[in-house]
Amino acid sequence: MTSPTPAPQRFAAVDVIRTKRDRGELSADQIDWVVDAYTRGEVAEEQMSALAMAVLLNGMTRAEVSRWTSAMIASGARLDFTDLPRPSVDKHSTGGVGDKTTLPLAPLVAACGAAVPQLSGRGLGHTGGTLDKLEAVPGWRASLSLEEVRRQLVEVGAVICAATGDLAPADKKLYALRDVTGTVEAVPLIASSIMSKKIAEGTSALVLDVKTGSGAFMKDLELSRELARTMVDLGTDAGVRTTAVITDMSTPLGRTAGNALEVRESVEVLAGGGPADLVEVTLVLAREMLASVGLDAVDPADALADGRAMDAWRRMIAAQGGDPDAPLPTARHTHDVVADADGYLDVDAMAVGVAAWRLGAGRSRREEAVQAGAGVELHAVRGDRVRAGQRLLTLHTDTPERFEWALQALEGGLPVTAGAPAVPPLVHERISS
Ligand code: URA
């Protein structure tokens, strides 16, 4: 018996690597082949590492990134929500400290008439994950079947749940490789990674919140702009109406960082209160989302004020087994941090993010559990006048041996100075196609 002849390999991985190494443009066929062959294990990890490094050093053209994104989408399933009775619109944030905006935003936009399929992830490192936050709500369940997602979108209008493993599996494999080869920071690879998952989710419109500043993935405004522009182009090329807003992440958003603490603050926003910066970012994004699906006559501020957004939140939580009336978990131990001088306070986002993570709000390995009650609560924010001895922050954790480690993260991150610190704009700019 003769064994079946393997399909001819259309390219040698080393030639694809050499093309990018020598600053050439990869052809559509080369890209389709290398992404598919890597996902199937035919291109070796060391070959994809070399290619990722060549992309980091030499970049990609718009046509290359667009094709790379399509190839990653084609590696898995693609959902379709175009048959829903409401227009669907999704939001993606590149992540930041205290960025709990998804929590009030999804029910708010649903209360205004759109369907919001928000497939989310867990946190790794100093920024929290949306699913970790919602899992602080007693009974709430992150894993839903596709049928349950659809039913909830029809009946409630908003769903926040775990993304299924079969969306862009090529990205899952490549992201893990980039993480250990110093190639996460390549703009074409970040943009195609984010957008392949978002486009595969099947939304008809997408609003991107690209964070900039010390607590963000992109610390520098110029790079944030490049990432935003690349992602807007990718969405547009794929037929998804896409806009981006670049927002500040040099200081934490709102007054909490940590899972249950952030849920509590989100509920304050849904009740018509909450910190002004969080309310502003939520409303800016809600208006963008509604405009992108032709619902711009609706003012989301009204839905916050009259309780419709809160009603949608309660239905969204209950639909996934959560009890919106149950008390949220609290940490067993707290520790106050006080000002050591009179003056104006500044608060660095990265310092607070790392402190919250070290207190147990985040994880350093994917399989680690997070503490629902852990995190940082701010009693004063950037630009506030403070007095020596005044309480600035409260640290929360179940494991008090972590306090010292968290305090080390805050060293230099809470300067009190004689003059008021510069306050960058909360919303830097908007980018559309
Ligand atoms: N988030 C992603 O999903 N991918 C990246 O490459 C970076 C951030």
Image (cartoon, grey):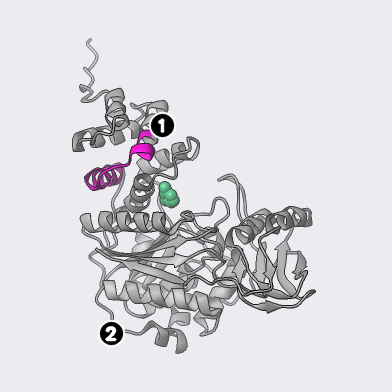
- Counting the numbered discs, the total is 2
Q: SS class of the residue under badge 2?
A: loop
- Quadrant in which the N terminus is drawn: top left
Nearer to us of marks 1 and 2 is 1
Q: Is residue 156 visible?
A: no
**Which residue in the protein does label 1 denote?**
49
Residue 282 place in picture, x, y as percent: 44, 74
Q: Please, what is the three-letter code of the amino acid marked with disc 2?
A: Ala
Q: Is residue 54 visible?
A: yes
55 inside magenta stretch: yes
127 inside magenta stretch: no
- The disc at residue 297 is 2
Give the crowd class for mark 2: few <14, some 14-19, many >=20 residues within 10 Å.
few
Left or right, 85 with reference to 174 = left
Residue 419 place in picture, x, y as percent: 64, 74
First to last magenta residue range = 54-75
- Quadrant in which the C terminus is drawn: bottom left
Q: Quadrant of residue 429?
A: bottom left
Give the dominant element type of the magenta stretch: helix, strand or loop.
helix
- Which is nearer the eye, 32 or 322? 32
Q: Please, what is the three-letter code of the amino acid marked with disc 1?
A: Ser
Going 25% across and 42% down the picture, which residue do you hit? 64
Going 25% across and 72% down the picture, which residue do you hit? 85
67 up-or-down from 359: above or below: above
Going 47% across and 74% down the picture, which residue do you hit? 104
Going 24% across and 76% down the picture, which residue do you hit? 294
Left or right, 201 with reference to 350 = left
